[in-house]
Image (spheres, coloured by chain):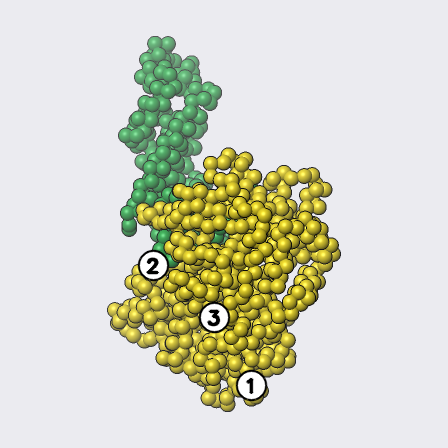
Chain colours: A green, B yellow
Amino acid sequence: MNASYLRYAGRRLVQAVVVVLLAYVFTFVVISVLPGDPVTNTLRNPENGFTEEEIARIVSYYGLDQPIAVQLWQSLSHFLVGDLGVSLRSNLPVTRLVAEVVPSTLALAASALAVALVLAFAIAYGTQNLPRRYGQGVLRAFPSLFLSVPAFVVGLLLIQVFAFQLGLFSVIEPDSAWATFFAAVALGIPVSAQVAEVLITGLDHESRQEYAAVARSRGLGQARLFAKHLLKPSSLPVVTVVALTVGELLGGALIIETIFGRTGIGSLVQRSVSTQDLPVLQAVVSLAAVVFVVVNLLADLVYPLLDPRVRTEPASASGKAGLGEAPEQPILERQVSVP
Amino acid sequence: MTVTATAPAAGVVAPASSALLCVEGLSVAYGRTEVVSDVSFSLERGESLALIGESGSGKSTIARSVLRLLPDGGAARGRVEFEGRDVLALPERQFRPLRGRALGFVPQDPGSSLNAVRTIGAQAQEAAALTGERDAGVRQQLILDTFAQVGLDDPRRAYDSYPHQLSGGMLQRVLIGLAVLPRPALLVADEPTSALDVTIQKRILDLLSELRADLGIGLLLITHDLAIAAERADSLVVLRDGAVQEAGPTATVFAAPSSAYARELQADVPALNPDRYRALREGRSPSAPAVARSVDLAVAGGAGLAVARDVDSVAVRDLDPVAVRSVDPADPAATAPVSPPVAASEDAPDATPKIELRGVTKSFTVEGRRLTALDGVSFAIERGTTHALVGESGSGKTTAVRLLLGLDQADDGEILVAGEPVHGRSAAGLRAVRRHLQLVYQNPFTSLDPTWRVEQLVREPLDRFRIGGRAVRAGRVREALAAVGLAEHLLSRRPAALSGGQRQRVAIARALVLRPDVLVLDEPTSALDVTVQADIVEVLVRLQAELGLTYVFVSHDLALVRQLADTVSVLHRGRVVEAGPVERIFADPERDYTRRLLESIPRPGVPDAVAS
């Protein structure tokens, strides 16, 4: 861990914080300019029977009579200290509502990711190390098979077989370990397909590289070649793919939660949308942004550790390497008739 | 199939049982395409044998068959006996223990032959593990000792580095170190020096010779460079299209090549033929480019590549029969200094140098350190002449060229083109300068966009500079193509459907299409085979004679520089250590550095192998 890596990490962290703040402001503005102010709608609903004074008092209590810039500033400053406001429906702090459902969704998404990675690496290992006659072709067909079956079909199938026929878990206890596991399998399978696809392509590519032949000439067998040489460079694009599939995991989680009857962010979002509970929605969107940014930050931080060639210094005027006999740098990457 | 080495008369073959490596009737095919046909040779312990041939001759395929590293789809037939065992017939489980321990491999391209995401130490440990040494500390010491032995200045740093942190020369030494570390009986070296500077090339070849002598390693050397083979190998096998053309002891093959192909190869190697291009160059007349252009169109317009080349050769013979004779490598006259070919340019009426650098300085900041790439570099190039920039990697050649092309800005000093300063011009002014300064890039296999057709590739500069209408551009494209001797039916081809020589001709046509005054040639032939190289050099020489072009020639092939350039600047660590007319510098270098560079040119005829 050298100084240049730490500086790199610091820069990435600052960028991540800026992205989260921008996402928050953007959501706030979008919600504000959308027609139909839900607070006023609710208050002015005759069924609720508020008087004009009460309405004015409530509006002023929430700060809704302030100019939008002031509202944004207040909202943002509260957000920065972790105060996400109060739900319009239940009068409970939004942080509490979100905190109630996050662990369940997080457990589901994390185990789904684990399932996806284990599956993908197992398939990829098989395609490289099994004798060609057996298995390889079948294994190579798995990713496209996985991708073509929707998660909810797999989910229903798993419930049918493992809950109803084998009785491995009960559908009325959706948070039990087995239930979570099978929900994670349903959610993880399509994700594993993408990871496996990228990994297999990477491994095929790497095993054709000259260094792989040279390593074989040093007496390395297939298994050691795979573990020591091919896996690491092939994993580089996997990091990117995993970071991108996090959105898919969150989105898919909402569907799987419904199928398996779990309470999670999915049910919270569904309720808040139908009741226009803006502070909760704002919180969930911000949370999603934070998760996304954090995952991509992790990917950025992992990359230089996997690949030493990734520059951790900001690009300088010229990319001249500096050791001893500096490698000759091509005058032009592609011959252009310098305009 | 013409000649094989199996004939005892060739003197290479001893009884199969005692030979270290004995290849008999080896054929290799990919699908139905046979790339190696019925090749036989054998190699004794402690001897060296060179497989010579151009790309596509099957020499690397033979090496890979011996090592059983053929890519998927390659099938080898015949016998490859190593220490009496047929390696082609061995099951993988019995062959694997031989890998590394008994059969060492030095690959061709140092840049891609080490895993980029692992440290060199980690990969060296794999080789060290083959020695059976169990103590990790001893293994590491063994690695560091080997690194020192192969000439790495700082073994510890190499051990801790990742491949991208070392230069090509250092990586090649690492790879040789990894191959020799387990003390194999046979070392297969596939073009071990083709990516290296001459001085490093010499060190590496010396090292391989030493290892051969000290450890009794048999060396199978694969090379396209006849000069190297002549200097370093005990015996030769000349290959073409997968078949043996000629084989025998080096001295015999060189003294009296019996096959036409071997003779042609020999005639095309600059180091063996110091006078090869002299006649052509003496035909230069910078004052009459316009006439020459039209003549050129008439000559090359309807002619294909082969025809154009024949025309050149005929012209050469007419001018000076000495230039094309097959030079005896032992003939002292062949290496004697050539008489000055520059006279024409020195009498040129325009006294202003075409290009002039005055005290140009440029430095870069890398990882916090200040690195001076160029330090007060000055040189001037007369119109219509060729100026060579020579020096090892990192000497500043590339930086000088980048500054000249306006790709980077100098920190200090002046760059003048035709007496006008380049520095401080407006963007439009720079464009005008660049239009007259064009670059021919080193590697035609990567410098042309594979998805474009020849016509587009050559026309692009015209589009960029918005020159003429469609008809004018089409005419200029045809004219440029004709000038480099490419037939018009190639216009619709894509680079993949062209040979290396044709691609480089396209690259030259692309540079010519703007009718520049100056061509910057960045190692224009180093990626090409010898015969193709000769072909491109002829094109360049002819174009200079006909169009009065000024060349800035960057090269590490000093044998070629000697023949092509009028003046030369020797760069070392960003400074010009010596400059002047080529014949003076080459005949009588004043500086040690220059002398060292010159001594690194392979000198067949001198070495022990042939001396007997």
- The secondary element bearing badge 2 is classed as loop
Residue B316 versus residue B297: which sits nearer the camera? B316
Instruction: Identify the amino acid type marked 3.
Output: Pro
Q: Mark 2 lies on which chain?
A: B
Give the left or right position of residue B24, taking residue B494 as reference.
Answer: left
Instruction: Identify the amino acid type marked 1.
Output: Ala
Viewer-nearest of discs 2 and 3: 3
On the rendered image, what quadrant is the C terminus of chain A found in? top right
Q: Do the residues labelled 1 and 3 touch (CB within 8 Å)?
A: no
- Disc ID at residue A198: none
C-alpha span from label 1 to label 3? 25 Å
- Disc ID at residue B161: 2
Residue B16: x %, y % from top left: 50, 88
Residue B565: x %, y % from top left: 53, 58
Residue B13 visible from this viewpoint: yes
- The secondary element bearing badge 1 is classed as helix
- Return the residue at label 3: B602
Instruction: Identify the amino acid type marked 2.
Output: Ser
Residue A265 versus residue B41: which sits nearer the camera? B41
In the displayed structure, B384 sits above or below B55; it is above
Q: Do the dots labelled 1 and 3 sit on one chain? A: yes
Q: Earlier in the sequence, mark 1 or mark 3?
A: 1
Viewer-nearest of discs 1 and 3: 3
In the displayed structure, B149 sits above or below B476; it is below
Residue A301: x %, y % from top left: 35, 47
- The image quadrant of residue A21 is top left
Residue B395 visible from this viewpoint: no
Residue B288 versus residue B360: which sits nearer the camera? B288
Residue drawn where x is 49% and y is 36% of the image: B425
- Return the residue at label 1: B10
